[in-house]
Amino acid sequence: MAFRLHAFWDALASAQRPGAGRPIGVPVILRPETEADIPAIDQINQDAFLHHPYSHQTEHLIVRALRASGALTLSLVAEWEGQVVGHIAFSPALIDGQDLGWYTLGPVAVLPSHQRKGIGSSLVKAGLQGLGALGAKGCLLVGDPSYYLRFGFRQGDSLRVHEVPPEYFMCMAFSEGAPSGLVTHHPAFFTTA
């Protein structure tokens, strides 16, 4: 599994070299987080969700708790002209209490000054490719359908989450169809302070 992920990072790095198909004028570099990125990741999540109507402004705490518990399966940053401006996290999700190879996407955040430049979309696409390289069966999230439908996410008819309106719970199967059952996110998602 580690070899497949290393091959993914090599392909990602190759695709980001100048002249390798990256759009002209889009100087974004996607890469795994490093320890030096942690303060920037905290700030990005705080700034991006500061005025979000459905946020409790705990996204930075969620990422910290996922990292501290070893549940941050995939954590990518977007770097723009040497500054970390975006972040995405993926963590294991349980379905009816079992690990079936599904992962939760979230949070994903981009500094407000760098939003609407395709950085969030690039992070989502790269993260989904990274999960595929890990052999994941699928990905799920709670989010705005108008944003996530473009990536292939659909409402999780066979899956459900407590206290989440079904229109905001979405999933994407990578191979076979989605299993059925109750989804449990990592306890980090219930961090309050």
Image (tube, rainbow, N blue to C red):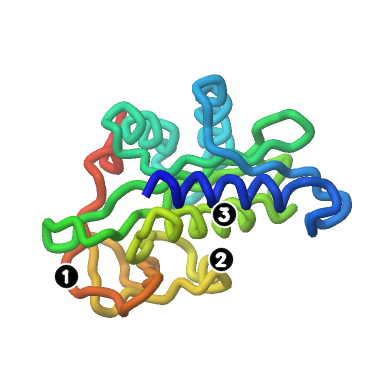
N-terminal-most mark, 3 or 1:
3
* Residue 48 showing in the rendered view: yes
Tag 1 residue: 181
Circle nearer the viewer, 2 or 1: 1
In which quadrant of the rendered image does the C terminus lie? Answer: top left
| Disc 3 packing (10 Å; few <14; some 14–19; many ≥20) | some
Q: Is residue 162 visible?
A: no
Residue 118, quarter of picture: bottom right
- The span from disc 2 to disc 1 (Cα, nearest Å) is 25 Å
Looking at this rendering, what residue extends furthest in the front direction?
A: 3
Instruction: Residue 156 in the image: state x and y as whole percent.
Output: 32, 74
Type of residue at label 1?
Gly
Give me the C-alpha separation between circle 2 and circle 3.
16 Å
Q: Quadrant of residue 56?
A: top left
The mark that comes first in sequence, 2 or 3, is: 3
Amino acid residing under circle 3: Ala
Residue bearing mark 2: 147
Q: Residues within 10 Å of mark 1 (few under 14, many from 20)?
A: some
Numbered badge on residue 154: none
Residue depicted at x 74% and y 53%: 117
- Name the residue: 29% across, 50% down: 92
Viewer-nearest of discs 2 and 3:
3
Find residue 91 and report its horizontal and vertical position in percent: 34, 47
Q: In x, y percent, where is residue 105?
A: 41, 53
In 3D space, how far apart are the residues under numbered discs 3 and 1 (Cα atoms)? 27 Å
Earlier-in-chain disc, 2 versus 1: 2
29 up-or-down from 128: above or below: above
Q: Which mark is residue 126?
A: 3
Report helix, strand or loop for mark 1: strand
